[in-house]
Image: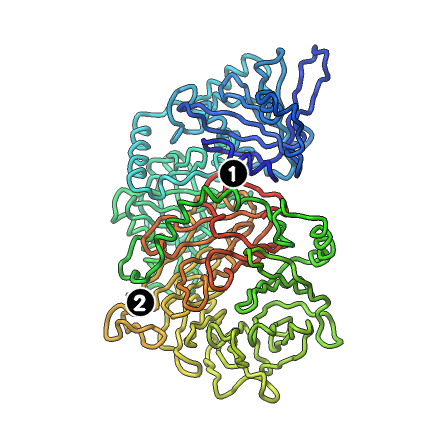
Amino acid sequence: MNFLKKFLGSSPKDDLSIIPSGQLFLKRSLGSPKSASECLYTDAAASVRETSAPHNYQLVVQRAFEEGEEQLKGDDDEEDDDFAESQDERVFLLDKSLEIYQTNRSGSIVVSWLNRDGDDGERFEFVVDESIKSSEVDQFMKTVYSCEYERKYNKSSAGVLTEQLQEFIIDPELETVEQSITKKGLVTAVSDDEEEAEDSIYEDADESKSAIRATKLTPSSPVKGSSKAEAEETEIKEDVKEPTGESIVEVKGELRLYDPTTESFSLQDSKADVSVLDLGKFDYWLSINGESGLKLGTNITSELNPVFNYELLSFVFNYETAKDEVFSWLLRFDSPESLLSFQTGYMRAAYEGANKIKWSKAEQSERKYVLDAFKTNDQDEEMDGYTINEEEEEEEEEDYDEEQEQISKPINLRTGLRKENFSDSEDEDEEQNKDYFKGSHNKNLTVAYKNDRSYVTRGDRIGVFKTTEDDELEFATAIENLSIGDKKSFNPSKMMLHTEDRALVMQGEDKDKLYRMDLEYGKIVDEWKVKDDLSVVDFGPSKKFNQLTGEQTFLGISDKGLFKIDPRVNGNKLVESEYKSYATKNDFSAFGTTENGHIAVASNKGDIRLYDRLGIRAKSLIPAIGDSIKYVETSADGKWILATCKTYLILIDAMIKDGANAGQLAFKKSFGKDGVPKYRTLRLSPEHVASMQQLSGQPLDFKKATFNTGFNVKEQTIISGSGPYAIQWSLNKILRGDAEPYKILRYSSNVVADSFKFGTDKNVIVALEDDVGIVNKRAFRKPDRQSLAYNPRKGAF
């Protein structure tokens, strides 16, 4: 909508929190001769905005316009700017006297405040749209109370305890003066020791720019006003029934809870007993018992999103309650030795729980490899030496604000056309093509290397989209009613472009068979049996760019072997002479190839085998961190290996750094007995993960991560997605040790898959559940309040 562009760019100050959709009413007093309720805006957004005056903020309600409505306003409006402003935007200074509160009426959430310029008893009411989650409104109100605190006390609200905001929270059901006085009396003073401890840790955080002090967010805050926060803590305390088990490690630490409104971790307990318990049968438990009576406990799994920070002696993790609410907690230790002791115990538990293998049986080099996996990433010169156009990246960031207006214009995902460019004929084209978007959801995306086409599967249909010269995406056609001969309809589960992008190789329910579609005719023309009783887990080109050639053969893997497939041979298509099978089940899950045909094969156990060619033993084995690998791909030159796990990515440098094979790729030579590769785990900060899960209602679950790719093109950006978020990482920022080397873009529905346009990292093709589109790289934003909480309307790209 034009309104959103205007709204987001209308103020030189930041909008701290937004309720993006609702209706504004004026509720008059009972004695008013006018109507009791008047609807002022039928579609509006409410925001909390900074002003130029320190510690002063505004509540802003701005009207939304229907498409084209803003341009149709008459000259009368333009003659009186003040009048026009009052009609389209209403601004209120956030002060305790505004008496703002949140209530629930007939199933709708209502935010109400006094009309200080009206008659006694008049109130404005913002009725929140039913599409907005209550957690977002809770966060909005928490921001309001923090702003009122700053205005009253003329100081920052950073680090303020929730109890200190209680005096600003109004309960509309408390009608008597005595109840109000009792309520205001709940304010609790902070001890000098606690203030000193908090000031110290915030100062440390400001200096180091680390995880203690987080970036601005607008997620649903775990601290939703004092009473609710206390109730949640009580619930956690009551729900946790600590199991009995042998203690692996016991230490003491300071416990803090992340509050996105104050953008910091607030102290909850100054001295907590922290332990890791072995419950038997490779089951482990994290136990935290605070001196104040606060208790936390949870199974140790990858969903905790653990991060260790030795600069601040901290451990950050996510905790999910029985109500599916996610909290981000921080443990701060008093010495590096305490943190190392805890990390060793925790990682032993995580490793054994994931691999079902005792920590004591792992090689010393493998233990170090695993321990390094969850540390924060500092700059590592040994992973450098990979030239990236850093000046171009910096120029992009500098130009971001100037070009954001153009980038943020809504795009029709079915046609790739921006709304202001629509014509009647284009509307007719969309009407004709909209049938493709009926029925089941989008499932697979593959991007052509040769002909600027993208293919998206949707049940038994394939949508074909083309990229224009202006880097926009247009719906080209739909291939309908896929079927195998005269048999039942065919729903592809995987697909690969083949033979100069003229064919699609696809897999369906029968895992031992593959099918070839001739894209010129739009029909499945071949059915290939790979091998009896051999389930094809994954398949792909034998060299990274083979789809640009007429090469007929390609590779496949089963759970315990890898092989070549040749469609030209009679009978089964597996080439027996180039079949590498293992006696034991390695549980292979995915593979990727380089430009020269080197192969990286990953497994559900989490390890990766590297081959210089098919049919021989692996040259190198990269040990498992502990989690299953869903996807793997390589850079064209083989230097980088990118693995996708459920809650994080792994970037591995395949160049051997020392020993007799130094300077060689691990595809060709072994790392050596005690050698392990240099690598980085690419994680979203636990605070961002908690916010994303609260806002989307979905746990972190990455889609396939890919590099930008092309002939003579350096890989410098990574793209993936989880839930309604697309996420991109800068390789340059990863290598220089940035704490948050990623940017995020939120959509109105879940990201099914995303991939770069071939030959560039400037444009990303994104398949949502019900839409397909292309987005400029610069539209991605640093994780902040707007980028995580903003809920775009369906059909806006």
Up the image or down, 122 lies above or below 319; here it is: above
What is the spatial separation of the Cα atoms under label 2 and label 1, in whole angstroms?
Answer: 41 Å
* Residue 465 point in image, percent of width and height: 62, 61
Residue 145 in the figure: left or right of residue 528: left
Image quarter of residue 335: top left
Residue with the mark numbered 2: 676
Q: Identify the residue at image location x=35%, y=52%.
A: 391
Please state which of residues 725 and 185 is positioned toward the viewer in this rendering.
Answer: 725
Please state which of residues 796 and 760 is positioned toward the viewer in this rendering.
Answer: 760
Residue with the mark numbered 1: 220
* Residue 340 point in image, percent of width and height: 28, 51
Up the image or down, 160 lies above or below 751; here it is: above
> Label 2 sits on what residue type?
Val
Question: What sort of colour scheme is used for the picture?
Answer: rainbow
Quadrant containing the N terminus in the rendered view? top right
Q: Label 1 crowding class (10 Å Cα cut-off): few <14, some 14-19, many 20+?
A: many
Q: Secondary structure at mark 1?
A: loop
* Residue 244 in view here: no
Up the image or down, 73 lies above or below 745; here it is: above
Q: Identify the residue at image location x=52%, y=36%.
A: 8
The residue lying furthest to the left in this view is 659
Up the image or down, 711 lies above or below 304; here it is: below
The circle drawn on residue 655 is none
Image quarter of residue 432: bottom right
Q: Secondary structure at mark 2?
A: loop
- Going from the N terminus, do you reach mark 2 or mark 1 first? 1
Please state which of residues 12 and 643 is positioned toward the viewer in this rendering.
Answer: 12
* Residue 665 point in image, percent of width and height: 33, 72
* Residue 753 point in image, percent of width and height: 55, 59
Q: Are marks 2 and 1 in contact (CB under 8 Å)?
A: no
